[in-house]
Image (cartoon, grey):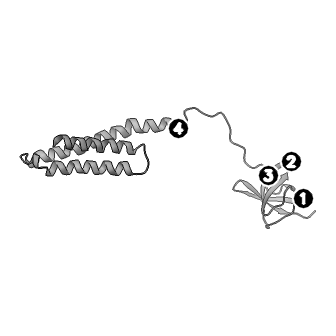
Amino acid sequence: MLTSIATLALFGILLLMLETILPGMIAGTLGTLSLLAAVWLAMTAEELSQWSGAQRASLVIGIVVSAAAILLVWLRWFAVKFFRRGFTLDTSIDATAEPGLQAAPGAQGVALTELRPLGRAEIAGQRYEVRCQTGHLPAGTPVEVVTSEFGSLVVRAISV
């Protein structure tokens, strides 16, 4: 009976370790059920009826503490390092971020595409993604920058 209890406990620990690698909660659920079955067998097995309550409690505490210690060691030193190697960047990238939008409010340009309400416009010699403040403007309409928001410029039509 002790071999059955030990087998269930080890199987449960292995399944809980496997849960850190496999998604889906199936391995974790089966591992938890296996550990609970080992604890239940340790407390109710007929072959262990000659053991005192303190001895059975010691066996149960040993199963639970051993499982917790093994899983904590696994999570701390092995599982985290395994995942860190696969999903983190070890080298730095020598690049700079793209500069922000350079067109200041009041800058003027011309709509290159229809703005319905999004499109492209050339302002001060640069092409920008723009959003029309009034909803729709045909291509070729002179525009003026009102403000910039969320990575695009807000423009309105100006009369020439």
Q: Which amino acid, by three-letter code, is at mark 3?
A: Tyr
Which residue in the protein does label 3 denote?
Answer: 128
Q: For the residues labelled 4 and 2, say whether their Cβ atoms are less than 8 Å apart.
A: no
Q: How many residues crowd around disc 3 within 10 Å: few (fewer than 14), some, or many (20 or more)?
A: some
26 or 97: nearer the viewer: 26
Label 2, secondary structure: give it.
Answer: loop
Q: How many marks?
A: 4
State the CA–CA distance, disc 4 to disc 1.
47 Å
Return the disc, 4 or 3, that comes first in the chain's sequence: 4
Q: Is residue 82 left or right of residue 150?
A: left
Q: Which amino acid, by three-letter code, is at mark 2?
A: Gly
121 or 159: nearer the viewer: 121
Q: How many residues crowd around disc 1 within 10 Å: few (fewer than 14), some, or many (20 or more)?
A: some
State the CA–CA distance, disc 4 to disc 3.
34 Å
Q: In the image, which is nearer the foreground, mark 4 or mark 2?
A: 4
Q: Residue at x 78, y 57 (%)?
A: 130
Which residue in the protein does label 1 denote?
Answer: 140
Q: Which mark is residue 125?
A: 2
Return the disc, 1 or 2, that comes first in the chain's sequence: 2
Residue 147 x/y as whole percent = 76, 58
Residue 45 x/y as whole percent = 13, 49
Q: Which amino acid, by three-letter code, is at mark 4?
A: Thr
- Residue located farthest toward the right when viewing the structure as drawn: 160
Q: Residue at x 20, y 43 (%)?
A: 4
- Which of the image's four quarters has the C terminus? bottom right
Residue 8 x/y as whole percent = 25, 44
Return the disc, 4 or 1, that comes first in the chain's sequence: 4
Which residue in the protein does label 4 denote?
Answer: 88
Q: Is residue 18 left or right of residue 89?
A: left
